[in-house]
Amino acid sequence: MKTYQLLKTKNIIFLVTALIFTSCTKLDEKVLDEVLGNNAQSPAGALAAAYDRLGDGTFVDHGAVFSLQEYTTDEAILATRGSDWGDGGKWRSMHEFTWASDNPIVTDNWNMLTNGITRSLTAIKQVTESSIPQRTLFLAEAKGLLAFYTYTTLDLFGQAPYRDPMDEKAPLEMKQAATEIDNLILQVEALIPDLATLGQQSTHNGRFTKEAAYGLLANMYLNRAVFKDRYAASFNFNEKSVNTSETDMDKVISYTSLLINSSKFSLLSNYFDNFAIKNSGGSELIFVVTQKIDYIHNGSNSFAYVCVERNQKPSPLNRGTNAACISPEFYASWDGNHEDPRFERKYQYADGTWFMNNGPGSVPATDLVPNSSPGVPWFHFNRGIMVGQQYGPKLTSTNTFEMTSDGRIKVSELVMEKSTSTKMDFTPALNFSKPTQAVFAQNEINRGARCFKYEFDPEEGNGSSNVDIPLIRLGAIYTMRAEAYFRKGLTTEALADINRLRTSRTREALYGNAPGVAIPSLNEAILYKEIAFETYWELLRRPQMIRFGKFEQPFSAKPTTQPFRRIFPIPQATLDVTKSIKQNQGY
């Protein structure tokens, strides 16, 4: 569905005809991702379509919400690399801050998010008019999804469309962030009694539960001051909350504490297990996009795929694409913290072999790609932030891994696929020829430290994945509470939360499973870095930079910018057909 149709039509209640879902009474994980039947008008089918929008690109593809929340920050950059990733400059524009209302990334994100609003409103109508036993639960979930899509749209665009789903003649309303943030908070708080507790009523972390509501409310309160006065030089984070005598930060502490103190969740010692192929049901994952390769959208490995070089192959069936990297500034923020278990983790095979990524060698070929016949060897890359010369398997002329004489996977020094005279030596420095343009020559495409936070799936199909994508995660919840404590002047409590994150994570057995090291003190600069150490590459950086007053500052190819860039323009295609919508300031 095109957004201009959403905004122009007299009736917002309709589904994309290509999405056909069956009627069912148990909305389980499978229904959220598979086309099972031909009754799109069932209440469960309409709700499934609303959930489907989360994973149909929106929150799982690097070109979707990720582009707006990460490529505009110091954590991620997608430069033009030789003959690749030019695409009319759309990727560079995110980092150079040159986007306009006709930018395809901006337009696509508006379309996807407003389509999520449409699908949620459709589900609300379908469920409201039904008499199914799950009516109360499904209605609360549909309204929760509406709040989630609306909040994200307000965050990115400052305004979001709405029509009363129960009135076909209702006029289009454009909700404005400054006023709608309070309404959203009240709406989500009102849903809590009707939402299921995670694990009850056949729910899982791919469903909008009470716990998902707590996480969303914490995030809304944390950013409420920004929504209230988007272009301010500073923000009043301790304003009185929406409907109590408590402050916004008190509410953040309250909602995050409900999750932190819950027996349902716990921090993982292996930080990277949160982003692994087998992370489904992980103890930190509160609300996720559930994925599986044999589902309709085949999952998305985009957050991993976009960093991996084309010659870095977890199996002969799959490859990376050599696009995104992190900025020198973000890499430098880790100085003195390379021993942090969240920075890097080496992989150990079942026979005890460690892949050290420091020279030629071999690893066993006993790990096989799932669903491959005959069994295809699976090579495991290390995880975390990758710099320096890279090593791994090479392909033979028959598209199989090079093997040693004793049947192991041969590990060799790698070169860049599209510049074979250039070693795959990932450099923290970028050194653009023109400092204000994120463009590399063909022999410079190795530049940039890479982020291997999400596990790269070896199954066939470039970009496909079994990794569930966290939308609300316990580790990030700790950072929210720490920030709220800090903004209230409770530095001791904030430091305790940051150190809980640090010391709960452990290194691999190669380093004696050593826990992370606590820090002795905390100030705003340290807190800002620590939040990023825990949450990098998770679609959270742009709001963090705005809250901490860092978003306008120059870094890498980004110039000093004006506050109007804190939100994106309404797409020109939408303005052309819906004259009642006003463009955002500065555009």
Image (spheres, grey):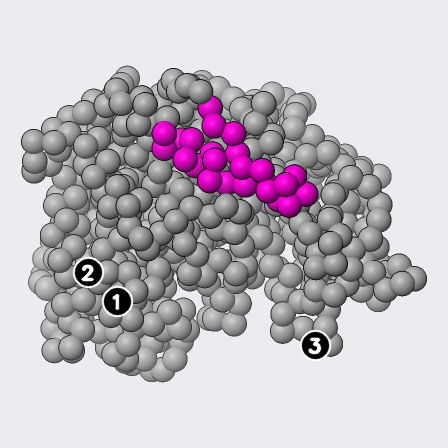
> Position of 183 compared to 420: left or right?
left
Quadrant location of residue 322? top right
Q: Nearer the viewer, residue 343 or 131?
A: 343
Q: Which residue is mark 2?
A: 195
> Position of 220 compared to 449: left or right?
left
Q: CA distance from mark 3 to mark 1?
A: 38 Å
Q: Measuring 39% from the left and 49% from the top, which residue is drawn there?
A: 266
Q: Amino acid at mark 3?
A: Ser
Q: Residues within 10 Å of mark 3 (few under 14, many from 20)?
A: few
Tell whether position 94 is magenta: no
In the structure shown, which secondary structural element does the residue marked by tag 2 occupy? loop
Which quadrant: the C terminus?
A: top left
Q: Nearer the viewer, residue 352 or 364?
A: 352
Find the residue positioned furthest to the front: 512
Q: Which residue is mark 1?
A: 200
Q: CA distance from mark 2 to mark 1?
A: 10 Å
Q: Residues within 10 Å of mark 1 (few under 14, many from 20)?
A: few
Q: Position of residue 276 (x, y in %)?
A: 54, 54
In the structure shown, which secondary structural element does the residue marked by tag 1 occupy? loop
Q: Residues within 10 Å of mark 2 (few under 14, many from 20)?
A: many
Asked if marks 2 and 1 touch (Cβ < 8 Å), the reply is no
* 358 versus 275 height, above or below: above
3 or 1: tag closer to the N-terminus: 1
> Position of 4 compared to 169: left or right?
right
Q: Measuring 64% from the left and 45% from the top, which residue is drawn there?
A: 509
Q: Nearer the viewer, residue 35 or 5?
A: 35
Quadrant location of residue 22? bottom left
Residue 69 in view in this figure: no
Q: Position of residue 4 (x, y in %)?
A: 29, 54
For residue 373, which numbered disc appears in the image?
A: 3
Question: What residue range appears in magenta?
Answer: 496-519
